[in-house]
Amino acid sequence: MTVRTDEWMPRARKLAEELVAIGKLWSAPWQEAVCAVPRHELVPDVLRWDPDGSWHRLDTTTDQGQREWLDHVYSNRALLTAVADRWESRSLRSSSSMPGLMTRMLETLQVREGNRVLEIGTGTGYNAALLAHRLGDTHVFSVDIEPDLVELARKRLARIGYHPTLVVANGTNGLPEHAPFDRIIATCAVSAVPWAWIEQTNPGGILLTDLKTAPGAGNLVRLTRYPDRAEGRFDPTYAAFMDLRHHPAAQTPNRPRPRRHCSTETEQRTTTLDPRTPWASLVVWFLASFDLGAHTSLGYRRPDENGKPTVTAITAADGSWAEVTLADDHGVHQVTEGGPRQLWKIIEDTYTTWTKLGQPSWNRFGLTVTKNQQQIWLDTPTSSHSWLLTSAQLCDIP
Ligand SMILES: C[S@@+](CC[C@H](N)C(=O)[O-])C[C@H]1O[C@@H](n2cnc3c(N)ncnc32)[C@H](O)[C@@H]1O
């Protein structure tokens, strides 16, 4: 399939203008890169979920299909590009993130000419292409755990003239054979920051990653490398990447699924805290994750006859669980809890603490990473309000 320059270039320019207008792109070199990189060459296969849970490829065999695909590719949308169909039907293996998220991250990374950059999570290679366009091939390194994705990205990048160093590897180890780097950017989420990344960053260098202490619990954090540690603040705007995996997705599911206790003993009570709180106040969910544990799941469950969920459900690795009815009686919701711990009580207590602290948003929080511990703090690294990452969160990462 050939796409003429006059078909994709105006679309790429329009995308860059749109990203500038919404504040996701501001510097001239990145604007130039977005206009110049033919994203469509890296995402020939875009997938879409059907309502029945299966997926299909966007059809590019007709003129109309090709136009729709191009519009899709040059829009501020995440593109689903690879799914694992072996162990779970709806499981995402790779995606090309929203261009606005990528450019915001590249801007936040404060890349300078001459920097050597390592990306964790090559995926389609689009981000690597933007980096290679700006810095040159020899300064860009990117790893992905999926061999087929790396192979495809290598071929497609070469076809459009980019030759960054791409390696099949578990990104938790960084890329020691090419270290040190001036910048490390991870486009997948980690439950703790691997110390290897810090060791492989030059002093004064910057690391940007999505820290998720439990599913959905955390945000992008930008760290500066000091001799003994890395430290920095969370991004003001929430973002969520797919989790880093320790094996290719075709082999194994990612996080262990929390299981419910067999015990039928439950406690019933009421709450006035809105059951949507973990989603509506993501900082609360993040702070609660330190007590709930890394292997916690959260969701809307128990659909009614119209398919609408009726409860918020939380389960933890020790078998504790809680369900809170979405329907209320004058602001009062029913809570059912089972297992050794009262999970909704943890959310309620965290909400109270967060409110007493003045309901701080993401940019008031920061992270300090040393070889032996990782600590979240409010406002300053020496604050009396701090939260240590648990051994389970640290254990997921070497
Ligand atoms: C959101 S995608 C990255 C998008 C990519 N930067 C792009 O421009 O298309 C996340 C990627 O992280 C990869 N990944 C997951 N676990 C990994 C690991 N342990 N090491 C390296 N890559 C990993 C996935 O295979 C996936 O391709």
Image (cartoon, rainbow, N blue to C red):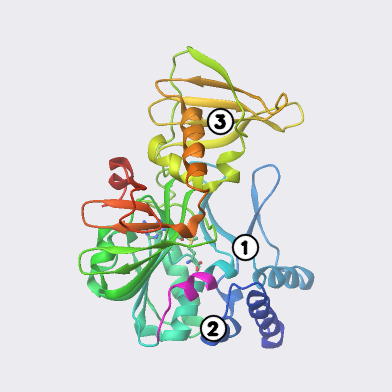
Q: Which amino acid does label 2 sit on?
A: Ser
Q: Which of marks 2 and 1 is in front?
A: 2
Question: Which residue matches tag 3?
Answer: 313
Residue 291 quadrant = top left
Residue lying furthest top: 265
Disc sitting over residue 209 in the figure = none
Question: Which residue matches tag 2?
Answer: 27
Q: Where is residue 303 in the image (x, y as percent from the top left)?
A: 68, 29
| Magenta span contains residue 137 | no
Question: Which residue matches tag 1?
Answer: 46
Q: Main secondary structure of the magenta part?
A: helix
Q: Nearer the viewer, mark 3 or mark 1?
A: 3
185 and 368: which is toward the camera: 368
Highlighted magenta segment, given as a residue range: 103-112
Please indicate, yes or no, whether residue 362 appears anywhere in the rendered image: yes
Q: What residue type is labelled 3?
A: Ala
Q: What residue type is labelled 1?
A: Val
Q: Quadrant of ligand 1?
A: bottom left
Q: Residue at x 41, y 58 (%)?
A: 379
Residue 5 quadrant = bottom right
Q: Where is residue 80 in the image (x, y as percent from the top left)?
A: 59, 58
Q: Residue at x 62, y 62 (%)?
A: 46
